[in-house]
Image (cartoon, helix red, strand yellow):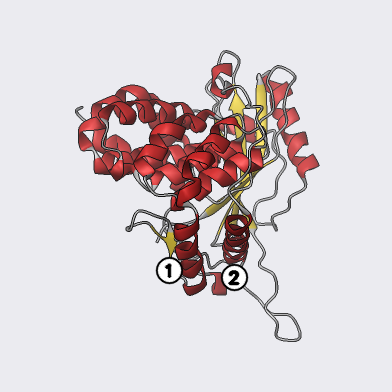
């Protein structure tokens, strides 16, 4: 089973760079360190108390002019204390780090894992690296999102999945039948229902992903494509969403695509997809790195002859992640990809 993480980003932004939309999403990961039950406690009535995440460590990315230790010296966070979402304090950390080292921008957030460890994330954009936040222009359309039946079923599924994460018991995902399914009876029933309801809306959902002004709708449409059928065609049409100005949309679009890399038979589409994922790999967010790493890994597992192109497009970024990241659900897939691209 892969460890699941939930990135929460509240960033300080200098006036030099446009802010990205707030991301709050579930990410891919690696092995769970301990079960949720080992972290849960009970109140006086015997009712399980809400889980408490603990600050475990600090992830720093994007810095190359100063050391990790120098940046850590500017960060006031007591490890081992309960996780909090005081975004003002996060912004203070970002401003202090940015002004001390005169970076172009600094974005501060957090990643929580189902073993109840939380990591502060500090995303540095050095001067001269502003290309890392260059995105597609925001779309301006206003399109319908499927129909009421699809929206109602998906809303119930989304609620159950969120509850599963917050309780430390997310349902394992399955994608062996060409659509997203779950090892959970209720979620499985909802997935089958969506598999019947969504296909007539597939092309319209693609239009929403690419053209609608509402980032929430774009992200939902990208996820619904998991049940739309003809996933290879959908990937060919929406892979540019990996450069959407919304981190929510990038997360959901790449998360959809990575499930079905083995179905993308066109070398031309895969080449375009590798380029998009290589750019996403450099975005200043853990969610982007995580999705791009697993997307590239799944692609290479299915299409090993693409290893040379992956090495050319993403090798430098992958080596940096493998060297610098302390988070296993980006470091380990980066190491696996590099192993697959050796001597290519």
Of 121 and 58, which appears nearest the observer?
Answer: 121
Q: From the image, state whether disc 1 or disc 2 is nearer to you.
A: 1
- Mark 1 is surrounded, within 10 Å at the Cα level, by few (under 14), some (14 to 19) or many (20 or more) other residues, namely few
For this view, does 136 lie left or right of residue 310? right
Q: Identify the image quadrant of residue 314.
A: top left
Q: Is residue 18 above or below residue 44?
A: above
Residue drawn at x 54%, y 35% is 207
Of 58 and 304, which appears nearest the observer?
Answer: 304
Residue drawn at x 67%, y 34% is 142
Sequence-wise, the earlier of marks 1 and 2 is 2
For this view, does 84 lie left or right of residue 274? right
Residue drawn at x 26%, y 37% is 265
- Mark linked to residue 39: 2
Q: Is residue 209 above or below residue 86?
A: above
Q: Residue furthest front?
A: 200
For this view, does 4 lie left or right of residue 139? left
On the image, the x and y values in percent for residue 189 come to 48, 69
Q: CA distance from mark 1 to mark 2?
A: 23 Å
Q: Quadrant of the C terminus?
A: top left
Question: Considering the numbered disc 2 on the image, is that residue within a helix, a strand or a loop?
Answer: loop
On the image, the x and y values in percent for residue 216 come to 65, 42
Residue designated by label 1: 183
On the image, the x and y values in percent for residue 315 come to 35, 27
On the image, the x and y values in percent for residue 288 come to 52, 37
Question: Considering the numbered disc 1 on the image, is that residue within a helix, a strand or a loop?
Answer: loop
């Amino acid at each position: 089973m892969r460890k699941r993480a939930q990135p929460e980003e509240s960033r300080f932004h200098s006036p030099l760079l446009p802010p990205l939309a707030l991301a709050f999403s579930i990410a891919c990961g690696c092995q769970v360190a301990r079960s949720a039950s080992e972290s849960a406690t009970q109140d006086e009535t015997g009712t399980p108390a809400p889980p408490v995440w603990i600050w475990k460590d600090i992830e720093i990315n994007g810095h190359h002019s100063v050391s990790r230790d120098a940046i850590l010296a500017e960060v006031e966070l007591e490890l081992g204390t309960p996780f909090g979402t005081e975004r003002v304090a996060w912004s203070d950390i970002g401003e202090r780090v940015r002004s001390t080292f005169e970076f172009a921008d600094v974005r501060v957030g957090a990643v929580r894992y189902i073993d109840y460890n939380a990591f502060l994330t500090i995303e540095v954009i050095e001067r001269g690296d502003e290309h890392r936040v260059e995105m597609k222009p925001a779309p301006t359309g206003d399109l319908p999102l499927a129909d009421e039946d699809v929206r109602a079923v998906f809303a119930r599924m989304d609620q159950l999945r969120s509850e599963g994460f917050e309780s430390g018991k997310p349902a394992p995902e399955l994608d062996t039948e060409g659509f997203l399914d779950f090892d959970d009876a209720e979620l499985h029933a909802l997935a089958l229902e969506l598999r019947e309801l969504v296909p007539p809306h597939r092309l319209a959902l693609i239009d929403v992903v690419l053209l609608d002004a509402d980032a929430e709708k774009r992200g939902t449409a990208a996820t619904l494509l998991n049940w739309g059928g003809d996933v290879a065609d959908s990937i060919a049409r929406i892979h540019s969403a990996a450069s959407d100005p919304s981190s929510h949309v990038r997360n959901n679009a790449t998360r959809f695509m990575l499930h079905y890399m083995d179905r993308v038979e066109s070398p031309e589409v895969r080449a375009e997809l590798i380029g998009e994922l290589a750019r996403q790999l450099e975005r200043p967010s853990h969610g982007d790195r995580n999705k791009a790493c697993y997307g590239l890994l799944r692609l290479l597992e299915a299409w090993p002859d693409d290893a040379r192109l992956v090495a050319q497009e993403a090798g430098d970024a992958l080596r940096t992640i493998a060297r610098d990241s302390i988070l296993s659900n980006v470091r380990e897939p980066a190491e696996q990809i590099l192993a697959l691209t050796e001597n290519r």
